[in-house]
């Protein structure tokens, strides 16, 4: 397989360094709105990277479900490998990549469990099938190659028949509280635009990075 000649000359857009947002969350929301216009189904997909107790990095795709001035929220099983990593080391990163726009956003911060009330509020608005899934799967545990979920699912459906499904206590949200947010815009000849926001003493400082 010949990979060395696979390349793309980026030229769809640029960052206007003369008219920048003071707050990177506002800038993120503008780019996210652009991403929704070209890919409304998966614009909120991002790569979450964590580090285990053995100092081994791990990455996986998660779905952003909320963003505000505090940070970026996703939901998961609190017994999963990613959650165990976060309990050991809350320093994480998120990476959004929207190839249709030739844009990337890298976020570094601390992952903090959101309140049970906020997790409950989100959970009750999930589709019933997704609510069942939170009870059904012991995420990251080993199961048989031919494991059939239907027996367990049928038992759950019987248990919750005619009832609201409550959030399992082992499932909920994390908010990634950012300390750095970098915006990357692909540019011709690999001279990419890179803008870094760093949080320091209650203000966001801006700097441009070399491509």
Image: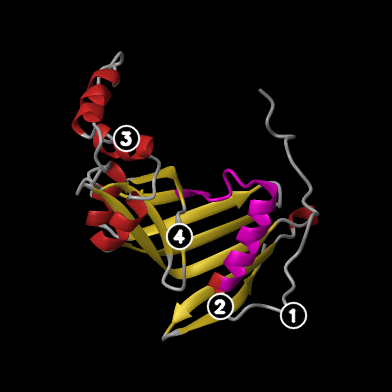
Question: Is the residue under label 3 in contact with that under label 2 (CB below 8 Å)?
Answer: no
- Helix, strand or loop for disc 3: helix
Residue at left 26%, top 32%? 136
Q: Nearer the viewer, mark 1 or mark 4?
A: 4
Q: Which numbered disc flags the more N-terminal residue, 2 or 3?
A: 2
Q: Position of residue 145 (x, y in %)?
A: 30, 16
Q: Which residue position holds label 1?
A: 18
Q: Which mark is residue 23?
A: 2
Q: Nearer the viewer, mark 1 or mark 2?
A: 2
> Quarter holding the C terminus?
bottom right
Q: Which residues are magenta?
A: 26-47
State which tag comes first along the sequence, 2 or 4.
2
Q: Nearer the viewer, residue 29 or 83?
A: 29
Please report the residue visible at 38 percent of the width from the left and 58 percent of the height from the top: 92
In the current view of this chain or complex, which residue is farthest to the top? 146
> Tag on residue 133?
3
- Measure the alpha-carbon separation of dots 1 and 2: 15 Å
Proximity of marks 1 and 3: CB atoms separated by less than 8 Å? no
Say which label, 1 or 4, has the lower sequence index: 1
Q: CA distance from mark 3 to mark 4?
A: 20 Å
Q: Secondary structure at mark 4?
A: strand
Q: How many marks are shown on the rendered structure?
A: 4
Q: Quadrant of residue 11?
A: bottom right
> Along the polypeptide, which appears first: circle 1 or circle 2?
1
Mark 1 residue crowding within 10 angstroms, few (<14) / some (14–19) / many (20+): few
Q: Disc 4 designates what residue?
A: 66
Image height of 150 relative to 84, above or below: above
């Amino acid at each position: 397989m010949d990979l060395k000649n696979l390349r793309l000359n980026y030229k769809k857009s640029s960052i206007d360094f003369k008219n920048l947002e003071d707050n990177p969350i506002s800038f993120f929301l503008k780019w996210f709105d652009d991403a929704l216009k070209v890919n409304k189904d998966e614009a909120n997909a991002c790569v979450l990277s964590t580090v285990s107790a053995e100092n081994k990095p791990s990455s996986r795709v998660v779905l952003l479900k909320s963003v505000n001035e505090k940070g970026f929220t996703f939901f998961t099983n609190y017994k999963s490998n990613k959650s165990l990593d976060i309990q050991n080391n809350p320093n994480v990163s998120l990476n959004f990549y929207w190839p249709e726009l030739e844009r990337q956003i890298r976020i570094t911060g601390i992952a903090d469990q959101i309140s049970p009330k906020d997790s409950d509020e989100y959970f009750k608005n999930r589709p019933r099938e997704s609510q069942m899934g939170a009870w059904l799967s012991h995420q990251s545990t080993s199961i048989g190659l031919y494991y059939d979920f239907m027996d367990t699912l049928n038992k759950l459906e019987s248990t919750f028949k005619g009832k609201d499904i409550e959030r399992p206590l082992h499932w909920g949200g994390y908010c990634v509280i950012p300390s750095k947010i970098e915006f990357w815009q692909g540019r011709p000849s690999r001279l990419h635009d890179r803008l870094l926001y760093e949080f320091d003493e209650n203000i966001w400082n801006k700097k441009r990075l070399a491509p």
